[in-house]
Amino acid sequence: NANARKGRRPSAPPDPGPASNVPMSDRIRIRSVELLSDGWTRLKKVVLDYRRREGVLETQTREVYERGEAATVLPYDPDRGTVLLVRQFRLPVYLASGAETMLEACAGVLDEDEDAETCIRREAEEEMGCRLRNLKRLCAAYTIPGCVTEKVTFFTARYSPADRISAGGGHPGEGEDIEVVEMGLGDAFAATRDGRIIDAKTIVLVQALMLEESGVRAAD
């Protein structure tokens, strides 16, 4: 699910192995790569030489979480002006703020040999019980480029009440306990301003859909 399927290790990039196998450039030279953790994701400590713009060479140490690619979607019902979101527990957010749940867009990590569209259609049915129509790719972006390799593909889609094929909720066996939330697009936009929605990918999707719908109304 969301930034990954709990209980299932995401498909990570191939292990670069020794530092000698990592791509080099005139400005960047990897000196060593140490595997710190190989659990649900890989955590590596990387020591590198980095040549600054003024030409000074300095040694830096960074820690990098290696995660696979992911996808996220915001389904929209234009007839009723509603969107589908999910509410679920996020441990890092709880540890940082005490918030027990988070309101966000449906998302998931790509399984091995799976493309972003296939992934997000599967996740939408598992988490929201919704069959997506008119899936539209918006962009792909790194969400935390300072320390995480994950790249997320963003989608919008269309749905109607007839596309709600099950109750959703995710996989309890994978630790998922997901509430499906339907709300007006205008209310979702307001939620990105008043603090009810504090998830970055969801803010991007809500604003993109608002812009899209504003363009449609202007054209009419």
Image: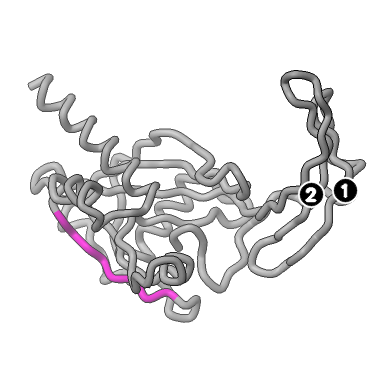
The picture places residue 212, in percent across and down from the top left corner, at 23, 30
* Residue 23 shows in this picture: no
The picture places residue 95, in percent across and down from the top left corner, at 46, 71
Q: Secondary structure at mark 1?
A: strand
Q: Amino acid at mark 1?
A: Ser
Query: Is 186 colored magenta in this rendering?
Result: no
* Residue 91 shows in this picture: yes
Q: Secondary structure at mark 2?
A: strand
Q: How far apart are the two marked residues, 1 and 2, measured between alpha carbons? A: 6 Å
The picture places residue 72, in percent across and down from the top left corner, at 41, 49
Report which quarter residue 84 is drawn in. Answer: bottom left
Count of marks placed on residues: 2
Quarter of the image with the C terminus in it: top left
Report which quarter residue 198 is drawn in. Answer: bottom left
Answer left or right for 22 relative to 165: right
User: In the figure, 32 relative to 50: above or below?
Assistant: below
Mark toward the start of the polypeptide (1 vs 2): 1
Which residue is under mark 1?
32
Answer left or right for 77 relative to 198: left
Which residue is under mark 2?
46
User: In the figure, 4 relative to 184: above or below?
Assistant: below
Q: Amino acid at mark 2?
A: Val
C-beta proximity under 8 Å, tags 1 and 2: yes
The residue that appears at 36% across and 56% down in the rendered structure is 106
Quarter of the image with the N terminus in it: bottom left
Q: Which residues are magenta?
A: 176-183
